Amino acid sequence: MTSELGANARALIDQACNEEAAPPHSELERIRKNVVTGAVSSAVMLAAPHAAGFVGGTTPLALVVLALKGGAAGTLVALAAFGADRWFASPGPRDAAGAHDAAPAIVRAAPVRTAPSRHTAVPALPAPPGPEGETSALRASTGEPRIGAAIRAEASSRPASGAGVGSLEASAALHEETALLKRVQQELRAGRGVEALRLLDASSARLERGQLRQERLAAEVLAACQAGELERARRSARAFAAENPATPSAARLRASCVGSEFFEDR
Amino acid sequence: VTSRALLPSLDDSGYGAERDGTVKGAVFDGIYQEKAAFVWRSLRRMGVPEAHLGDATQDVFVVVYRGLPAFEGRSSLGTWLFGIVLRVASQWRRSVRRRSTEPLTETLADEQASTPFEHAARSEATATLYALLDQLSPEQRAAFVLVELEQLSVPEAAEAVGANVHTLTSRLKAARRKFEAGLRRHQARTERGRR
């Protein structure tokens, strides 16, 4: 269809489109890692023995490991144990309006939010271990499609080797880090900055090399501000600014108690 | 200038044919590499504040990653992707409005927040474009972005938003009128400011 816009409008659009900056590469890479890791973690944590029950006499964890170690054949066996026909039978999108409905079955079935946290930009994960996590995992183990897709994603995203064990550990660490950030966020929302700092301190050594350092630093700045520990807030903000000079997350800290010192309007 | 060049290649890419029961990590990586910038830009054009673009982009690709095994290619991947962008953008707009009165720890980012990237992105032309787009309703905005910025045909745009061609045409006409009127007002203000 030929545009019926006037020349001025057309010129503005063309100029604006030409000037629109590309997103920062580092940010896109971070997002990609979060998405892939998050999806893998979901599969692993759903299948964690403490949370899930037994399916057909085989634990979901065993099925995941089987899928990991057995490549395509292992995946098929694992899927068969789960009732793979149900996964494959899920309809695809009929049109673009059904976009969410496509992924869908998987996303809707999740009892917890599947998209990552807005505030911490962490990957989507099920609820941390506990009653709620157990419930959701049990529900999933009864045959909701997302487990099938998650397992397929898990299995197919890895080479057929024994590399799965290290990844399982990494996923568990990421889950712990995500759960920690969730709790810290809750404390911050409740105005308990001291408690939020305590949580961060308690895990700092263990998560020193965690994947969500940026988010933990940001939370630390906010918690220190709330707890009235200005020096600490400055220290954390300085580290954050040095490590993440141009990330949208920096904007989150601009209105903090030390924001004017480290995150000026630019 | 626009992502128009990318869309046709996705239409016939055969990504849907990859649905052999397993998600191919390489397929996701390929889609991500090719479309991440398009998704980012589209979310911005659909009204997601710059401070939230990273998170919103992540939301879109979480859906893509999880939905890929079920994607059967009945619609093109391009329109499927844009449909997800529309829904995520809509959720983000609602979310930002809802949180705008909440404390910092809840909001964490504000719409005016600016990083170097955002600053660079805000040339006068882009700032004007975004401001004019903000005046459109979400439906009009989607139609306008798809046809005028992404340069899709009306039938393609209609498919992307899940509307019929007639409806899409009506929304597009209304959007053009509003956009042109807003631009005239903006130019008049600018002219007065110069005097």
Image: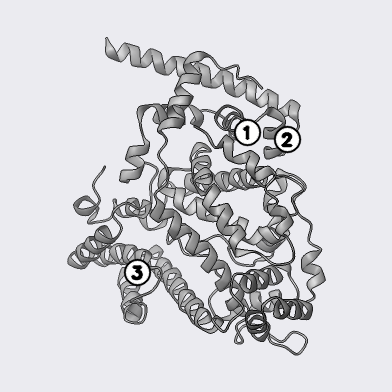
Q: Which element is circle 1 on?
A: helix
At label 2, the amino acid type is Ala
Question: Do circles 3 and 1 both sit on a common chain?
Answer: no
Does residue B142 show up?
yes
Q: Which residue was labeled with disc 1? A: B139
Looking at the picture, how far across and down is residue A178, in whole percent?
46, 71
Dot 2: chain letter: B
At label 3, the amino acid type is Arg
* Real-space CA distance between mark 1 and mark 2, rounded to the nearest whole angstrom: 10 Å
| Position of the C terminus of chain A by quadrant | top left
Residues tagged 1 and 2 counted as in contact (Cβ below 8 A): yes
Residue in the image at 69% along x and 34% along y: B156
Q: Which residue was labeled with disc 2? A: B163
Residues tagged 2 and 3 counted as in contact (Cβ below 8 A): no
Looking at the picture, how far across and down is residue A131, in whole percent?
59, 80
Q: Is residue B184 above or below residue B138?
A: above
Looking at the picture, how far across and down is residue A115, in whole percent?
55, 60
**Image disc number at residue A192:** 3
Say which label, 1 or 2, has the lower sequence index. Answer: 1
Q: Is residue A245 above or below residue A174?
A: above
Residues tagged 3 and 1 counted as in contact (Cβ below 8 A): no
Looking at the picture, how far across and down is residue A109, in whole percent?
69, 65
